[in-house]
Image: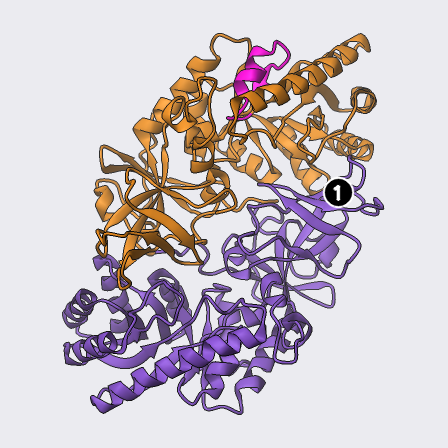
Chain colours: A purple, B orange
Amino acid sequence: MINKINPQAEIGFDVPAVPGMTESEVQTPCLIVDLDRLEYNLKKMADLIAPFNVSLRAHAKMHKSVDVALLQLTIGQASGICCQKVSEAEVFFRAGITDILITNQVCDARKISRLAGLAASGCRISVCVDDMRNVAMLSEEARKQNTQIHCLVELDCGAGRCGVLNVAQVVELASAIDAAHCLVFEGLQAYQGRIQHETDYGLRQKVMKDVIAKVKDCRDTLAAAELSCRVVSGGGTGTFLFEAASGVFTEVQCGSYAFMDADYGRVHNREGARLDQSEWANALFLLTSVMSTALDGHAVCDAGLKVQSVDSGLPVIFDHDDITYITCSDEHGVIRDKDNKLKINDKLRLVPGHCDPTCNLHDWYVCVRDGKVEALWPVSARGKAW
Amino acid sequence: MINKINPQAEIGFDVPAVPGMTESEVQTPCLIVDLDRLEYNLKKMADLIAPFNVSLRAHAKMHKSVDVALLQLTIGQASGICCQKVSEAEVFFRAGITDILITNQVCDARKISRLAGLAASGCRISVCVDDMRNVAMLSEEARKQNTQIHCLVELDCGAGRCGVLNVAQVVELASAIDAAHCLVFEGLQAYQGRIQHETDYGLRQKVMKDVIAKVKDCRDTLAAAELSCRVVSGGGTGTFLFEAASGVFTEVQCGSYAFMDADYGRVHNREGARLDQSEWANALFLLTSVMSTALDGHAVCDAGLKVQSVDSGLPVIFDHDDITYITCSDEHGVIRDKDNKLKINDKLRLVPGHCDPTCNLHDWYVCVRDGKVEALWPVSARGKAW
């Protein structure tokens, strides 16, 4: 199941590791994927949603990895994947994944042409829409390329980003899509991005109750107008059990559950337990080495801003509670180590603050099992932002 | 002077633009380098330090671009470059740059082997040292590869990162380097990273006065011990004129001046003027497109956390004071646009909050002059973190 085809490359310059190495030999800083933990998370998600009438459309924007996506589709029982950008979808389609939802607007003419090109090449492609002119552009290009594009109307659920606000706008857009040549009205995109990382379970529950009521209202109004939703899609790692149990959503779009990160780790589940100590295992680590211990009471490691995003807080040092990562600059992390225990070349596993933008900084996942490198996976869609 | 060799690639999938396009046709989000402004900054730096007895060793960690580095060495009159990582130095040496200072510790055995490999291949390589065991490791490997490594003792100047704290430690390290086989004691690395972005000129001046006194003391004590410093290196875009005028430093290590960013823009010069309205021109932009205007009073653009680092604040919208970039998520930026002026597919130039980690997210610089794409430059050492 694990892709073990490995690149022929120069260790250090091109790749941080080769299979067979021990974790202590890996060149740092780099990303480590703990395969046992990843597989645990993928199976756990399948188990958690099994009681409900929803499928998992795994969000590949998080990991940007063909290898992880293929595992999600097999052992994770996902029905398809989500992407955020056309260029990401191109990477995953080239790897043989043929059912892709772009959970985003595609407005630029050249990008719309590439989107239609994916559909014309045999990809079942869906995209989100919140603008009437965009409907016309998508339709025109799909007709030009003699293909079909599936469209979800995006409803703003309180995230204050893309999506229309009210039912009347949803119906107007859905009708336009339904009437447009070569477009298929597929249903609704309803993702509350802002509430995913709220640590308090009760608050997430309260917000999601309103979101679900609003989405149900839209779905029912559309059905009354003979615009039935084949798909109602939404839900992330922080809320997906609400969507799954709603009877309204048909699929969930979780991404972070596969790897986890420090910020999601602090979120509490219904029993008040942290997600990283209950539902999910930390499977993604930023491996770093100590490079200076010159100053008393602290050590400097080689993992700074160029190998992680600190937008959601600093990384947490895994499996150590006597040392703390306290500041981050371009190339360095400073670790408080009051007893001066750390030595130069000591290696530490960091749990990144936020997995998505951290993964996007790296070219490789070094996949480890039982302390040994088992495979090297490219971050296939790294940098694919267009 | 401008490298105009252009990649043969698929627009959109592989590259965001090709030469001859207008800026409005470029696929977003991507980095734009305004060539007139870049050339202005490079010449300006040469002019600013000309009165002083210092050279510029331009810091290539900022742009990670062979093309920019070569311009710095030619029209910018730089004497060499700095890097932070061995893998970066490998990229620049392969491109023909033969005098490189790694302004960082290199401690891992495999990295030390690669460092010595650069020296053995004809690169004049210098590295920073703050640990006695590291001296022994560097010496052993240089001897094994029958080459020489130049070493600067790093002095902590208040940044609280790498470097030793006091003169006695500096002398001890310098003596050990001097006595070690195949190592050359080169001088001092003294960079006050923490004060570079302090906006207040008077505060920077005060801190730098103490730094310069401490560095002078070290240099003089070393000279008295017959360990003379050929090089005293330090200084960034926020402080380099202090180092240049000190009579103590022999070279400055500026990086950000070439591109500038929003955070350095807010720093004031001695006349109280912002640096981006006096010394330096913003030459680096993140080009973004509006992709949703569904919600009243705001617009959503396609530049989020995956194309910029927000560690030093959000980006500033260039040349517009009626709209403001107010929040950033993985793939989106939300722009306050109270008069709903923005339309879908409108393009905006953003000035990134922090240039170094932003450049490291991208594969290409789209080089523009007079609104037209003149060249595409790879971000040659992107992701080279080892």
Left-right relation of B273 to A131: right
Quadrant in the picture for the C terminus of chain B: top right
Tag 1: amino acid: Ala
Which one is nearer the viewer's eye here, B23 or A199? A199
Which one is nearer the viewer's eye here, B77 or A385? A385
User: Mark 1 = which residue?
Assistant: A299
Residue A82 in which image quadrant:
bottom left
- The reply to whether residue B108 is in sight is no
Q: What residue is at 37 percent from the left and 26 percent from the top? A: B277
Image coordinates for residue A121, horizontal then vertical, percent: 28, 72
Residue A352 in which image quadrant:
bottom right
Circle 1: is it few (<14), some (14-19), or many (20+) Cα within 10 Å?
Answer: many
Which one is nearer the viewer's eye here, A6 or A37? A37
Image coordinates for residue A253, horizontal then vertical, percent: 45, 75
Q: What residue is at 51 percent from the left and 64 percent from the top? A: A63
Q: Chain of mark 1?
A: A
Q: What residue is at 35 percent from the left and 69 percent from the top? A: A102
Image coordinates for residue B27, horizontal then vertical, percent: 29, 51
Q: Which residues are magenta?
A: B236-252
Residue A138, compared with residue B142, is above or below; it is: below
